Image (cartoon, rainbow, N blue to C red):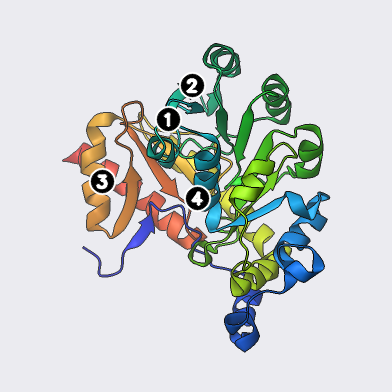
Amino acid sequence: MSASLLYFDRNENQYGPAPACFDVLRRAGIEEMSVYSRDFQRGVKSVLSERLARDFGVPESAILLGYGAEDILKQTVHCYLGAGDRIMIPSHSWWYYKTIADEVGGVTVEYPIVEGDSSFEYDIETMLRLYDEQHPDVVLISSPNNPTGNALAHDDLIRILTHMRDGIVVLDQAYWSYALEENNDVGALHAEYPNLLIVRTFSKYYALAGVRIGYAVMGSMLGELERFSARYLGYHRLSEQVALAAIDSAGYYRDIAAKMEEDREMFRQTLGALPGFTVFRSHANFVLVKMPEQQCASLKARLTERGMIVKFMNEPQLHAHMRITLGTQEQNRLLADAIVACIREEVLA
C-alpha cells in the first residue's frame, strides 16, 4: 500500500480555503481569541450573521449560526421533534438524519428518490402523497442530495413548499454552491415561506470543514428555534472572520467549482465507458457510480492497494455503488485511470 493515501471518501474539499482565510489566522490577536463578542450591543448576533443577512436581503434576526450544518440540523430536530413525532427524510440520504431523529424518539418516514437513466430524481408525487397521509411534524429535504448528487429543480421546490405550508420544512443545502448556474434565491424563499429553514455550511464549497461553521435562514414561524439556539456569549469570533474572508474570495471558489464541473464530466466519460458502469449526474463535489456488484469488492481492494480510498456503499438500496469525492484535477485523473486499470486487470485475470 502507498505510504501516502488519497482520500476520495469524505466529501472534503482538497483544494483548501482561499489564501485570504489564512491571512486572517496570521493576523489574529488577543481581541479575537480572548474577548467575548460585543456585537449584541448593536442589536445583532455577530458580524457574520449581519453580513449574511445583508447578502441575502433578510432580517439579521433570521440568521442562525452553528457549529457546522450538522449542529443546526441537530438543534432543529431536537427543538421540533418529540417521541412518536414523524419526520420525513429522503430514502437515499445522509445516515445522520435518522440518527438525530432516533435521539429524541422520532419516527422517520422515508420518501423516495428514484434512479433514472442518468441521474437520481425526487418522486414528487409520492412525496406529497406521503405528506398528506403521514402528517409529519418536520420534512427534511436535501438538495443537492448526498450520496446521489441530484438537486431539486426550482419549480419542483416551489411546488413542494407550497404544498407543505402547514409543516416545518428543512432544506439542507450543504452542497448548493457547486453548481455553476446561479441558484441563490434565499431571500425570495424566506419571504414567501415562513415555515422554511434553509441550512448551509462553510465546510464543503469553502473548504472550511475543520473550522466548523454553518448557518441557516429561519422563516418567521420558527421563533421557537431562535430561542432554543440562542447563544448569550456570542459565537466563535476567529471562525467568523475566516468565513467572511471566504465569502469575499468569490473568484477563487468559482474557479474551483469550474474545475469540479469539468471533472464530473471527465468521470462520466471515462468510467461511463466501462461495461456495466453508470456515472450519475451530480450537482455536488462527488459523483455516484453504479457498477457490476460482483466487481465491487475486488475494485475496492485494488484501489486500496494503490493508496486510494473510495467510499463503497453498503446500504440496502445502494450496494453496487461507489461515491467518489472530487479531489484536485490531478488526483481525479489518477483515480479515473486507476479504476480503468483495475477493471482491465480483473477482466484479464
- The residue singled out by tag 3 in the image is 300
Give the mark nearer the N terminus: 1 vs 3: 1
Quarter that holds the N terminus? bottom left
Mark 1 closeness class: few <14, some 14–19, many ≥20 residues within 10 Å? few
- SS at circle 3: helix
Tag 1: amino acid: Ala
Can see residue 50?
Answer: yes
Give residue 112's mark.
Answer: 2
Give the mark nearer the N terminus: 1 vs 2: 1
- Answer with left or right where residue 309 lies relative to residue 17: left
Badge 4 vs badge 1, beta-carbon distance below 8 Å: no
- Residue in front for this viewpoint, 287 or 335: 287
- SS at circle 4: helix
Give residue 70's mark.
Answer: 4
Badge 1 vs badge 2, beta-carbon distance below 8 Å: no
Can see residue 177?
Answer: no
The answer for how far apart the CA atoms under marks 1 and 3 are is 40 Å
The answer for how far apart the CA atoms under marks 3 and 2 are is 28 Å
Tag 4: amino acid: Glu
Q: Nearer the viewer, mark 1 or mark 2?
A: 1
Tag 2: amino acid: Pro
Badge 1 vs badge 3, beta-carbon distance below 8 Å: no
Q: Nearer the viewer, mark 1 or mark 3?
A: 1
The residue that appears at 33% across and 38% down in the rendered structure is: 313
Give the mark nearer the N terminus: 3 vs 2: 2
Q: Position of residue 338 (x, y in %)?
A: 33, 52
Q: Position of residue 250 (x, y in %)?
A: 72, 62
Give residue 310's mark.
Answer: none
- Residue in front for this viewpoint, 198 or 9: 198
Mark 2 closeness class: few <14, some 14–19, many ≥20 residues within 10 Å? some
- The residue singled out by tag 1 in the image is 83
- Residue in front for this viewpoint, 177 or 81: 81
